[in-house]
Amino acid sequence: MSMDAAPHDRSHDDLLSALEVIEEQPLAERVPAYAALHDELAKRLESGPRESAG
């Protein structure tokens, strides 16, 4: 594994762990947990590098 892949693998593992925790919760508690995860992922995407459309 290269050093470049490590952050991606770590974030992938973190996401899978978060999903496992959410799925173990009662159904009524999953909705706010998924909403919070959605917000966190949206923030990550918005703060990431942007490609120029030119």
Image (cartoon, grey):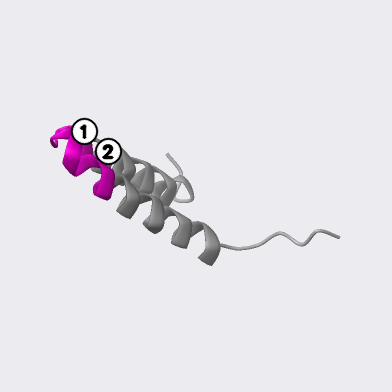
Left or right? Give the position of 42 relative to 11. right
Q: What stretch is highlighted in magenta?
A: 21-33
Residue 49: image location, x then y, percent: 60, 63
Is there a contact, CB below 8 Å, between mark 1 and mark 2? yes
Q: In which quarter of the image is the N terminus?
A: top left
Badge number at residue 37:
none
Give the number of the disc on residue 19: 2
List the single residue furthest toward the bottom.
47
Residue 32 on the magenta segment: yes
Residue in front for this viewpoint, 48 or 41: 41
Q: Mark 1 points at which residue?
A: 23
- Which residue is rendered at x = 14% and y = 37% of the image? 25
Can residue 21 be seen in this snapshot?
Answer: no
Note whether 39 is above or below 29 in the view shown: below
Asked whether, in this view, residue 21 is left or right of residue 34, the answer is left
Badge 2 amino acid = Leu
Give the percent coordinates (x, y) of residue 7. Answer: 40, 52
Q: In this view, does 45 lie to the left or right of 10?
A: right
Magenta stretch encompasses residue 49:
no
Q: Quadrant of residue 43?
A: bottom left
Circle count: 2
Q: Is mark 2 on a helix, strand or loop?
A: helix
The residue lying at 23 percent from left, 40 percent from top is 30
Looking at the rendered structure, the kind of residue marked 1 is: Glu
Question: Which class describes the residues within 10 Å of circle 1: few (<14), some (14-19), or many (20+)?
Answer: some
| Crowd class of label 2 (few under 14; some 14 to 19; many from 20; radius 10 Å) | some
The residue sitting at the right extreme is: 54
Q: Where is residue 38 in the image (x, y as percent from the top left)?
A: 39, 50
Of the pair 46 and 3, the residue shown nearer to us? 46
Secondary structure character of the magenta stretch overall: helix
